[in-house]
Image (tube, rainbow, N blue to C red):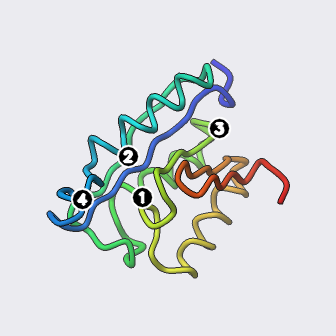
Amino acid sequence: MDKAQLVAIYVRVSSDKQVEEGYSLEAQEKVLRDYILQQGKTVFKVYSDEGISGGRYDRPGLQSLLKDAKKGLFGSVGIWMISRISRDLLHLLKIIDVLKNADVNLFSLKERFDMNTPL
């Protein structure tokens, strides 16, 4: 299958409070999975980190996603909102740089952020 049709999902929660507020891993995954399928694309894999702050770059799920991106296993990464992938601006820029160098798009549903669309 063409890598452009394969989309990785990244989900994260750091606390029970976030789960109570509707940010559960399952809720994030469902919204993203539905969106990806509506676009006619295929979910490659769901990467997740539970109970780990978005201020940390060394999250296992995130590191696995970046490693697979560098291998060219998928063409896009979907996140529910930017704070799920990072709460640190420098880390976010580093993640974007890694993905861009691997020719992998990043999009966020909540902010309507998509690296493939012009301003």
Q: Residue furthest right?
A: 118
Q: Residue at x 55, y 48 (%)?
A: 109
Which residue is found at the position 43% from the left and 59% from the top?
A: 63
Disc 3: which residue:
75
Tell me if label 1 and label 3 are in contact, CB under 8 Å: no
Residues at circles 4 and 2 in contact by the CB criterion of under 8 Å: no
Residue 6, above or below 15 = above
Of the two numbered discs 2 and 3 on the same chain, state the one appearing first in sequence.
Answer: 2
Say whether disc 4 or disc 2 marks the residue closer to the N-terminus.
4
Marks 2 and 1: CB-CB under 8 Å?
yes
Frontmost of labels 4 and 2 is 4
Secondary structure beneath label 3: loop
Image spot of residue 24 (x, y percent):
25, 50
Secondary structure under tag 2 reads strand
Q: Secondary structure at mark 4?
A: helix
**Residue 115 position within the rendered picture, expressed as x and y whole percent measured from the top left:** 72, 54
Disc nearer the start of the sequence (1/3):
1
Q: Label 4 to label 1, Cα distance in Å? A: 23 Å
Q: Where residue 41 sits in the image (x, y, percent)?
A: 59, 23
The type of residue carrying mark 4 is: Glu
Type of amino acid at the residue the image marks with label 1:
Leu
- Residue appearing at x 38%, y 46% in the figure: 47
The type of residue carrying mark 2 is: Tyr
> How would you rate the neighbour count of disc 1 (Cα within 10 Å): few for under 14, some for 14-19, many for 20 or more?
many
Label 1 sits on a secondary structure element that is helix
- Label 3 sits on what residue type? Gly
Q: What is the distance, in whole Å, between disc 2 and disc 3 at their CAs?
A: 15 Å
Which residue carries the number 4 mark? 21
Residue at numbered disc 1: 62
Q: Name which residue lies at 36% across and 34% down.
A: 30
Real-space Cα separation, disc 1 to disc 3, in angstroms: 16 Å
